[in-house]
């Protein structure tokens, strides 16, 4: 069976949902979008894998999480992430380097976290970071360069092997309970997880005393309005609008409110970095756009608590 129904909300375990959208995966307009989006897949393969599945989007009445009601099987997810996406991955080592701000953002985030945690634990402690869903290990390698003991979890064997070749210690998910980390990062990960609550609970229990868990996911604040007028006929041209609920991949769609409820339900409370610290360790002031980002983004995240980037600690 290619899909199964999630009969409980993956955030709060509620069972009362409202359907917001419904399209069969074998509908011509949906197949046209998937064929264009996953362009490396041989013709006809999409329909073979997706079968008679339904792209059904529901909203939980209890916590407000919006999610894909039908869950792809493990075999199907392995096919999508291993073959459909792998050949077009812009972060692959064989591809050209990413834009410069991709790397400067990593550097400033890592420096801010290190300084904040050193203020909690002292400068003599060697910090332990875990990058959960680390991909090719770019963020992890940057953190390692700043003197942190870095570990990673990555389900793709090819990506995990490459990260290990860069000196990143790769762990299996079942090894996490045997470790304690000062920081655990999940960058664009939780939206992909079939059972996000269970995973985040495991990560929370792997935090050292005073440790921080980062959850960063696409912001789905506008997704209800998008779905009300959505048509798959011109979906490829407007794919960024549906991205928080990307078919097959983005199984869970958060808003700032539903992310806070999700974290609270996992026994987590928010942590705010001091603005002075964030500004002191921001690295790119090269132009008007970079300056505006550096000044406004921390206020949005840590003062106004908007967006779907959150730092949390155990309640």
Image (spheres, rainbow, N blue to C red):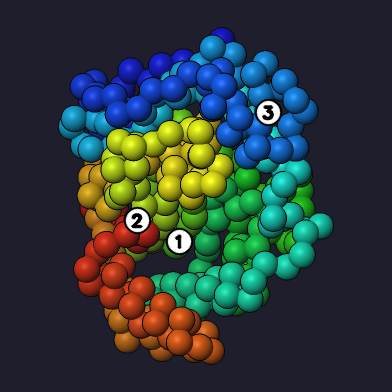
**Up-down relation of residue 41 to residue 315 (above or below):** above
Report whether residue 56 is seen. yes
Give the position of the N terminus as an image quadrant: top right
Q: Which of the two discs, 2 and 1, labels the residue nearer the N terminus?
A: 1
Q: Residue at x 51, y 39 (%)?
A: 234
Residue lying farthest left? 62
Q: CA distance from mark 3 to mark 1?
A: 31 Å
Q: CA distance from mark 3 to mark 2?
A: 28 Å
Residue lying farthest front? 233
- Tell me if 306 is positioned left or right of 240 in this view: left
Q: Which of the two discs, 3 and 1, labels the residue nearer the N terminus?
A: 3
**Up-down relation of residue 149 to residue 198 (above or below):** below
Q: Which of the two discs, 3 and 2, labels the residue nearer the N terminus?
A: 3
For mark 3, what is the residue? 79
- The numbered dot on residue 183 is 1
Neighbour tally class for label 1: few under 14, some 14-19, many 20 plus, Cα within 10 Å? many
Looking at the image, is mark 2 or mark 1 nearer the viewer? Answer: 2
Looking at the rendered structure, the secondary structure element under dot 3 is helix
Q: Residue at x 18, y 32 (%)?
A: 62
**Up-down relation of residue 159 to residue 306 (above or below):** above
Q: Point out residue 309 in the picture as x, y percentages from the top left corner.
A: 37, 59
Looking at the rendered structure, the secondary structure element under dot 1 is strand
Q: Residue at x 29, y 40 (%)?
A: 224
- The numbered dot on residue 224 is none
Report whether residue 263 is seen. no
Q: Point out residue 215 in the picture as x, y percentages from the top left corner.
A: 40, 53
For mark 2, what is the residue? 308
- Tell me if 82 is positioned left or right of 148 in this view: right
Q: Quadrant location of residue 41? A: top right
- Tell me if 311 is positioned left or right of 28 in this view: left
């Amino acid at each position: 069976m290619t899909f199964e129904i999630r009969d409980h909300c993956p955030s709060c375990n509620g069972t009362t949902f409202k359907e917001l959208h419904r399209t069969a995966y074998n509908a011509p307009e949906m197949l046209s979008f998937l064929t264009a989006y996953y362009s490396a897949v041989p013709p006809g393969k999409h329909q073979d894998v997706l079968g008679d599945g339904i792209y059904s989007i529901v909203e939980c009445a209890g916590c407000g999480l919006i999610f894909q009601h039908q869950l792809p099987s493990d075999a199907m997810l392995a096919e999508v992430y291993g073959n459909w996406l792998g050949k077009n991955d812009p972060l692959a080592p064989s591809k050209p380097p990413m834009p410069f701000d991709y790397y400067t953002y990593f550097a400033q985030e890592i420096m801010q976290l290190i300084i904040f945690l050193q203020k909690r634990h002292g400068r003599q402690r060697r910090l332990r970071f875990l990058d959960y869903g680390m991909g090719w290990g770019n963020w992890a390698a940057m953190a390692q360069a700043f003197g942190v003991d870095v570990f990673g979890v990555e389900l793709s064997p090819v990506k995990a092997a490459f990260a290990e070749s860069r000196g990143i210690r790769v762990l299996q998910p079942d090894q996490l309970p045997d470790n304690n980390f000062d920081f655990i990062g999940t960058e664009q990960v939780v939206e992909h997880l079939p059972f996000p609550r269970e995973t985040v609970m495991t990560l929370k229990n792997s935090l050292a005393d005073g440790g921080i868990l980062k959850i960063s996911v696409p912001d789905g604040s506008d997704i209800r309005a998008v779905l009300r007028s959505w048509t798959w006929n011109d979906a490829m041209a407007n794919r960024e609008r549906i991205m928080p609920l990307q078919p097959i991949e983005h199984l869970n769609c958060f808003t700032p409110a539903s992310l806070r409820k999700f974290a609270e339900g996992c026994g987590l409370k928010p942590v705010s970095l001091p603005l002075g610290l964030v500004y002191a360790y921001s690295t790119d002031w090269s132009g008007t756009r970079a300056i505006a980002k550096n000044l406004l983004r921390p206020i949005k995240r840590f003062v106004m608590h908007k967006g779907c980037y959150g730092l949390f600690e155990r309640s």
